[in-house]
Amino acid sequence: MRQYLELCEHILHNGATKEDRTGTGTLSVFGHQMRFDLTQGFPLMTTKKTAFRLIVSELLWFIKGDTNVRTLLQDNNHIWDEWAFAQWIESDEYTGPDMSDFGRRAQKDLEFAEVYKNQMLIFQKQVLENQNFAEKFGDLGPVYGKQWRSWATTEGGTIDQLKNVIESIKLNPDSRRHLVTAWNPEFIDDMALPPCHIIFQFYVADGKLSCQLYQRSADVFLGMPFNIASYALLTHLVARECGLEVGDFVYTTGDTHLYVNHLDQINEQMTREPKPLPTLHINEEVESIFDLTLADITIEGYDPYPRIKAPVAV
């Protein structure tokens, strides 16, 4: 994972200062690529602890075509909470304290941070316990899972892109059309967050499956370690489904940025020497990628440096 630290150093020295949707500000470079040989270990960040359980939970959520945070909350996964929470507080049904600009206010105001925390707990409890509330405010719209598994057609049907690409790999491994896309322009405005990782392609050679991801926008400190591990895991799962070994994960990014309020954290991380990568284990008794659960996917030999906390830009 040294190439990740080299990317961070490159951005710090060469990044352009840019404004962004969140109002936080970034250092950014455009167009970057990293390649990970998946036969050399599972690429989970070792220079800071990265929550593998959350990565697995989110990926399985995508694979099952789910778009509601209720499923994630049942797994104690809070990756998508802020975007669902924003839907609630911006609705006519919300009657609590003013939560406008809650992300930045919570970072700057300790008293407000406590109010925000309490309102978020109320929201999470409602999503878990109230089915109607979860359907109304927990659903994030046609985000990744919907596009992967139920892409809407002009004739009123749906396309299961993930199932189709698996069948395509099995039947015609040399095809150059092993693609899945999450970027559906017709429904971007209906999504709580437009997709950042927008298209991935599989490639078969010498009995090995490789995957290339194109990501339009990459939060290098918080998001990128999750994205690398998630698509490396997806490559393992699809290879296993298709009776192939794993090859490379090629990670291509567009706007590749460090938020300015993450610079202290990234400088701390860059002082740490990468450690050996862990090993991935998948329950061999579960045959289909679509039947896997959180307990079926584990890692061994993961010995990272401690976690480094940083605020999420919403």
Image: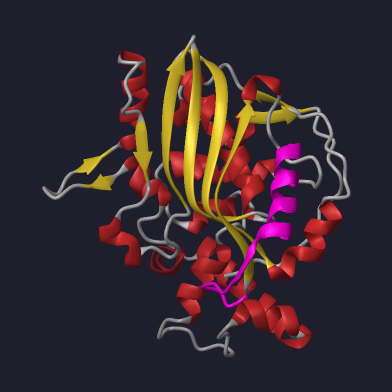
Q: Is residue 306 above or below residue 280?
A: below
Side (left or right) of 172 relative to 157: right
Q: Quadrant of residue 41?
A: top right
Q: What segment is highlighted magenta in the picture?
A: 1-24
Say which of 132 and 80 sits in front: 80
Q: Position of residue 190 (x, y in %)?
A: 33, 65
Give the residue displayed 57% in from the left and 90% down from the top: 98
Q: Residue 248 in the image: x percent, y percent?
A: 57, 25
Judge by depth and name the residue closer to the eye, 226 or 35. Answer: 35
Which quarter of the image is occupied by the N terminus?
Answer: top right
Snapshot quadrant of residue 139: bottom left
| Residue 295 position within the rendered picture, expressed as x and y whole percent measured from the top left | 63, 33
Q: Looking at the image, can residue 287 be seen?
A: no
The reply, left or right, for residue 84 in relation to residue 53 is left
Q: Which residue is drawn at the image coordinates 72% and 78% (left, top)?
A: 107
Examine the rendering and report whether any part of residue 248 can be seen.
yes
Residue that lies at the very extreme toward the front in this rendered image: 14
Camera-nearest residue between 227 and 89: 227
Quadrant including the C terminus: bottom right
Which residue is nearer to you in this view: 22 or 306? 22
- Residue 113 in the magenta stretch? The answer is no
